[in-house]
Image (cartoon, helix red, strand yellow):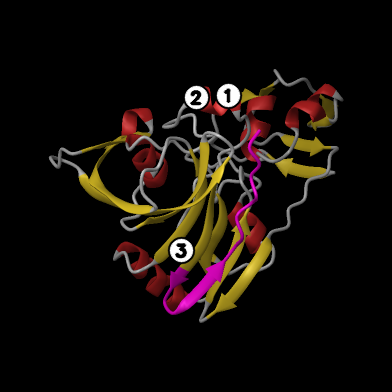
Amino acid sequence: MIRHAVPQGIVPGSLQHYLTRAYPLLNVRALLKKRDVKVNGLRREGEFLLQPGDELLLYGDCDFSIRVLGQENGLLAVEKPQGLPVDVDSEGIGADTALSRVRAIFPEAELCHRLDAATGGVLVLATEKAAWEAALAAFREHRVEKRYQALAGGEFSREAGEYRDFLKKDAARARVRIGGDSRGALRVETRWRRLEKVGQELTRVEMEPVTGRTHQLRAHMAYHGHPLLGDDKYGDRALNRRHPGKLRLWCCRVRILGAEFTSQAPQWPER
């Protein structure tokens, strides 16, 4: 059973919508169908209008653990599950996040960087202030080496390569655009290496985001004809329908301040 108080200041909305955001890895639809959710002591349907301060009881189980990959020099690395946000969203909603799971074990932990909710793998935090400040500087100055694996579409004519373009943020649409126009844009650089062919139309690739921009890997690979499987924002939706499932993108290795943390990418099958 899970007890939860809806935080003050949120905009009232449906119970189902709120729970999906607060507990993204919980099967909210199944809980509501079985009427296993109470609001202020009464069982409620998913359409019920939730208010700030409401008390929730969820009669379901959720594993709030997180795998620790290692600790070194005041840094801590964990393996973030796919679908789990790193922290609360812009409205402060997020009862279950990677940070909350880590702080249940290491209350002093602070985030050093972020991964998209849909991306899994190595997430680095700090348990000491000096290490946290040094890590933030290392990320800001692009002194961190990150390696990812993904399943991508399109034919690769070479074994390895490097893409260099420019990226512009479109805040209104919560996305980015890649192109060759440098005006008002940020330089974006991605190195990639082909690992193996997977079925007839997919390739497992390793990628290094040299510049580390928002949505860089997803947008940059798609721009060059290699959409990442499961990416509906920048990818190929027809390809995704032929191989349904989550985004196949995983952070496998992070080297920072002399420390190295690794996590093995899933063996995603072609479906």
**Residue type, numbered disc 2:** Arg
Q: Secondary structure at mark 1?
A: helix
Q: Badge 3: few (under 14), some or many (20 or more) residues near its Cα, within 10 Å?
A: many
Image x and y of residue 142, in percent: 31, 64
Image x and y of residue 97, in percent: 61, 50
The disc at residue 265 is none
Q: Secondary structure at mark 3?
A: loop
- Sooner in the amino-acid sequence: mark 3 or mark 1: 3
- What is the chief secondary structure element of the magenta stretch? loop
Image x and y of residue 106, in percent: 64, 69
- The picture quadrant where one finds residue 72 is bottom right
- The picture quadrant where one finds residue 108 is bottom right
Q: Which residue is mark 1?
A: 241
As drawn, is 49 to the left or to the right of 133?
Answer: right
CA separation, marks 1 and 2? Answer: 6 Å
**Residue type, numbered disc 3:** Cys
Q: Which residues are magenta?
A: 255-271
Residue 121 vertical position relative to residue 136 in the rendered view, above or below: above
The quadrant in which the C terminus is found is top right
Image x and y of residue 191, in percent: 35, 55
As drawn, is 191 to the left or to the right of 94?
Answer: left
Q: Is residue 127 visible?
A: no
Q: Which residue is mark 3?
A: 112
Q: Nearer the viewer, residue 22 or 57?
A: 22
Residue lying at 31% horizontally and 56% vertically, measured from the top left: 211
**Residue type, numbered disc 1:** Arg
CA separation, marks 2 and 3? Answer: 33 Å
Residue lying at 79% horizontally and 22% vertically, measured from the top left: 44
269 magenta-colored:
yes
Do residues under tags 1 and 2 come within 8 Å of each other at their CB atoms?
yes
Q: Which residue is mark 2?
A: 237
Q: Nearer the viewer, residue 11 or 258?
A: 258
